[in-house]
């Protein structure tokens, strides 16, 4: 019997007793294996949730950071149920189906299919997004590099705000230790380190997090490079971590600047690199994550300033273009990654990058959606960065898409998105 439905975030199924999380003490008392039910899940909870039998939230979407990381950890997760905290009773046994988004009363077994097909090697580079450094050695043989090292999870696992770690003199070391694991596992394949992109509400629960402001819509607030530029000492610590790794001989690391809104932010970030002795574009690749309409329509300025690669974030692009909070349940039906306006902006970026010989790479949820990936290949994207558990599947999708393009002989200009 289905108790409630939400949005499934991955292929995993979990069974356990419901444990509702209302405060920090409830998190501390988790034993492992429970079905954790919470109104909103934030990044700082991840260190407690990796042993959960499943996670259910009232709010949140498929593209939320928590949903992505839990999938990477192979924790069954259903988000956006609306009333999960009301409908699910404490202590009852439920089954969480992360594929369908259904939550069943009692134990429900679901048969899964296993892909035993061989590995495909398309011309398009297939990279991976990594939130958990410890799985790098497992996925490295299957991927052509890392499109996004998301270091935020390593920071949050310490339980301390980046400013607290900075004051303790530990921030650079925490970053360097995590990036080193990934760079080692993938060498000589390229790995791109993304500077911090943590919304303020996900930092508040950490030790020292009281310094964060109250924001009604943190996803459109103080985050990305704009936040780091307000505290350049934290940004310097991030760059110092990369500098130390380069001094130790790691030559496969690049840096990307996230959620850039204006060329001035990109220039400021590169100037801070130079202050600590890094030489952008000369000794390490530097690029930006194009996630806002403002960067799409001023991309020529970024190219003139110097870009070795570009990554595309379709989730934030859709949120900004459509004025829809991508974590909002009430407006979820209006959040559309394949809206014509979003697709046209992605086309513009890919076309300009191809004209200038700059690698373009999709990151985030879109890189794991077969229908979007097929469209991106047809549009001419250079590389796809997907979730760890989707690498083999996306390799096959891309290989087939490339063959389809070749068979058409590149004669058709039609690139309308179709499911």
Image (cartoon, rainbow, N blue to C red):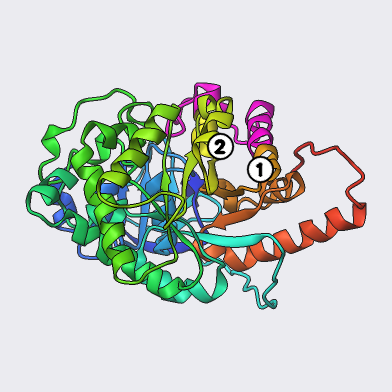
Residue 134 in the image: above or below residue 3: below
Rounded to the nearest whole Å, what is the CA distance between mark 2 and mark 1? 8 Å
- Front-most of residues 333 and 175: 175
Sequence-wise, the earlier of marks 2 and 1 is 2
390 to the left or right of 412: left
107 is higher (above) or lower (below) than 280 = below
Labels 2 & 1 near each other (Cβ < 8 A): yes
Indicate which disc residue 402 carries: none
Residue shown at 51% from the left, 67% from the top? 109
The residue carrying mark 1 is 356
Residue beneath label 2, please? 303
- The C terminus sits in image quarter: top right
- Residue 91: in sight, yes or no? no
Q: Specify the quadrant of the image occupied by residue 33.
A: bottom left
Where does residue 251 sit, x and y in percent of width and height? 42, 67
Across and down, in percent, residue 106 comes to 41, 60
Q: Residues within 10 Å of mark 2 (few under 14, many from 20)?
A: some
Please tell me which residue lies in front, 402 or 88: 402
Magenta stretch holds residue 405: no
Where residue 297 sits in the image (x, y, percent)?
58, 25
Mark 1 residue element: helix
Q: Residue at x 67, y 48 (%)?
A: 381
Please say whether residue 401 is visible from this viewpoint: yes
Name the residue at 62% across, 73% down. 114
Q: Residue 197: image x %, image y %? A: 34, 42
Stretch in magenta: 320-349
Q: Residues within 10 Å of mark 1 (few under 14, many from 20)?
A: few
């Amino acid at each position: 019997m289905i108790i409630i439905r939400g949005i499934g975030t991955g292929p995993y199924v979990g069974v356990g007793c419901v444990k509702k999380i209302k405060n920090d003490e409830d998190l501390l008392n988790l034993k492992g294996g429970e079905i954790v039910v919470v109104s909103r899940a934030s990044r700082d909870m991840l260190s407690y949730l990796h042993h959960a039998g499943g996670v259910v939230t009232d709010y949140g979407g498929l593209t939320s950071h928590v949903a992505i990381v839990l999938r990477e950890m192979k924790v069954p997760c259903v988000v956006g149920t609306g009333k999960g905290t009301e409908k699910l009773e404490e202590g009852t046994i439920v089954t969480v189906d992360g594929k369908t988004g259904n939550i069943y009363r009692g134990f429900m077994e679901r048969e899964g299919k296993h892909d035993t097909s061989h590995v495909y090697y398309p011309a398009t580079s297939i990279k991976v997004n990594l939130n958990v450094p410890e799985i790098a050695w497992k996925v490295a043989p299957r991927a052509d590099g890392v499109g996004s090292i998301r270091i935020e999870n390593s920071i949050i696992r310490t339980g301390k705000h980046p400013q607290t770690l900075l004051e303790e003199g530990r921030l650079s070391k925490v970053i360097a230790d995590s990036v080193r694991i990934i760079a080692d596992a993938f060498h000589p394949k390229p790995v791109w380190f993304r500077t911090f992109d943590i919304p303020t509400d996900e930092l508040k629960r950490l030790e020292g997090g009281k310094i964060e402001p109250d924001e009604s819509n943190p996803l459109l607030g103080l985050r990305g490079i704009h936040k780091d530029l307000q505290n350049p000492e934290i940004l310097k610590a991030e760059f110092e971590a990369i500098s130390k790794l380069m001094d130790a001989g790691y030559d496969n690391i690049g840096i990307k600047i996230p959620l850039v809104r204006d060329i001035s932010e990109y220039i400021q970030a590169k100037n801070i690199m130079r202050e600590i002795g890094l030489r952008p574009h000369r000794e390490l690749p530097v690029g930006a994550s194009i996630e806002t309409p403002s960067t799409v329509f001023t991309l020529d300025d970024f190219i003139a300033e110097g870009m070795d690669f570009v990554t595309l974030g379709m989730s934030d692009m859709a949120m900004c273009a459509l004025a829809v909070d991508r974590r909002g349940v009430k407006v979820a039906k209006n959040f559309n990654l394949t809206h014509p306006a979003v697709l046209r902006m992605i086309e513009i970026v890919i076309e300009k990058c191809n004209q200038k010989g700059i690698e373009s790479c999709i990151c985030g949820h879109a890189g794991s959606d077969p229908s979007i990936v097929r469209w991106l290949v047809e549009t001419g994207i250079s590389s796809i960065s997907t979730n760890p558990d989707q690498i083999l599947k996306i390799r096959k999708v891309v290989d087939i898409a490339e063959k389809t393009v070749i068979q058409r002989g590149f004669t058709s200009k039609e690139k309308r998105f179709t499911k």
